[in-house]
Image (tube, rainbow, N blue to C red):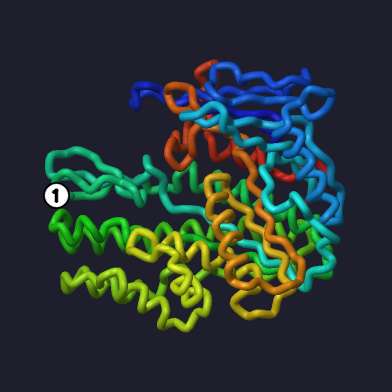
Amino acid sequence: MRGSDDLFVIRQPEDPAEPAVLRRYDTPDGSGPRPVPGTEGLWQTAATGAPDQEKAVRRAFQRVHTLGEYLGEGDFATGADALIVRSRRDQAHKAVFAGAEFGGSRHRVHIKGARNLQGTARHADRVELVSGVCLFSHRNLRFVDEHGDRTELLRADAAPPAARLRSIVTEGELSFYEYETVVRQARVIGDVAAMLPSSLPLTVTLDVPRVQYYLYLLDAFQGGLVATELVQDYFRLVDGRYTQVLDLFRRHIRRALDATGRTDATLRVAPGLDPLAECLWEAVTTGGVPDDEDLLGLMLATGDPLWKELRELDVPHGRHCLGYTSYLAELLRATGLSDETGGALSINVDSFGEALLFDQARQLRQRLDPPDDGLPSLGIYAAETVQTLRPDGHAASLYLTDPGRYAVDEDGARVDLFGLVDGVYAPRPGVT
């Protein structure tokens, strides 16, 4: 099974001991929207021949067309269909991912910042592209308390553990979430690069968290619910996974860029919260975790002008917000704000769940007196061709519903999902 024209759906079973089930759906022939069978809130609609097409769908395809004209290079066309994902809590709210064919691949994308584009990308002096991927997934790393119960802490809003933590359970290989996200976003980055004027210098910033993940365990440590040795083990585990994910991401992006002839592109690694690493290692050794203001002070001491600006704008900077602020800083840096040079076309290629970060960064940019160069900030969010469902049939974030590496198809045959993703996002025939 392969091909990004199709849609693959993995449904999680009610019984965690049972394997997830994979189904494939063809692109719809009819023009009207139709629910994807066996799902709740997941719809498909053909791109053409629909005079009564929903406004949201028409707008999504118009943004794809506008983006293609703005980037201005390479073969570009709207795709055959759109994917509509309705909110589980409120069916009136939905995200539309319109089909786009560019750079030799097909994607379903949600685009931000393309509503009132003026001119073309040739007006830019350079392109700054930012992309990222989180570590682990909810299934891939759990903490076990003294009663043998597992708890998940890898969320800013996670509840504190109910008992003292004794051990960490993790799978040795990458989660399906990590692998799929890396392969999908690298493919999109390569395809976007193919659409850009080759004369424009291109920098791709890889914003992969590391020290941001240290913060998740600090409350439990301060509350006496986790021993120093276990925190140190967790930090080492995070460091190892960071290196593994970053290396994979870098290789896939470089391969995708080289295939488009953009061997001149620069890959940059975002520093994130690295200035806090030594301090936090020392803190868990001595037991004296710095307060929020001290942590912020260390970031301000780096001299990064964006952290100073964000502090003055009262962007939340408490311990649980520091990671979020670091991601905002990179999106703002891509616009050229930090060096006041302007001339930067900024593009965020990420998963749709990160689009709220992009929205906030754009709002902050207006408050920070941006250069008057008329250049936009663009967000390009490709839907997963391999969608995941909760047991109730509702679509969910792959980070939250990671099925693991293997599923079974409708005939009960085992499917390697890593291999499926490789096929889905492989260059199309005739494209290197």
Question: On the image, which quarter does residue 298 sit in?
Answer: bottom left
Q: Say few, some or many: other residues with alpha carbon within 10 Å of mark 1 (under 14 / 14 to 19 / 20 or more).
A: some
- Residue at image position (42%, 79%) is 300
Viewer can see residue 236:
no
- Residue at image position (56%, 32%) is 93
Q: Is residue 10 above or below residue 120?
A: above
Which quarter of the rendered picture does the N terminus lie within?
top right
Q: Position of residue 242 (x, y in %)?
A: 44, 60
Number of residue marks: 1
Left or right of 134? Residue 234 is: left
Q: Secondary structure at mark 1?
A: loop
Q: Position of residue 257 (x, y in %)?
A: 72, 60
Front position in the image: 213 or 46: 46
- Residue at image position (21%, 49%) is 167
* Kind of residue at disc 1: Arg
Q: Which residue is mark 1?
A: 164
Q: Position of residue 164 (x, y in %)?
A: 14, 49
Q: Position of residue 227 (x, y in %)?
A: 15, 59
Viewer can see residue 372:
yes
Left or right of 280? Residue 265 is: right
Front position in the image: 403 or 283: 283
- Residue at image position (45%, 42%) is 399
Left or right of 305? Residue 173 is: left
Left or right of 260? Residue 366 is: left
Q: Is residue 358 above or below residue 5?
A: below
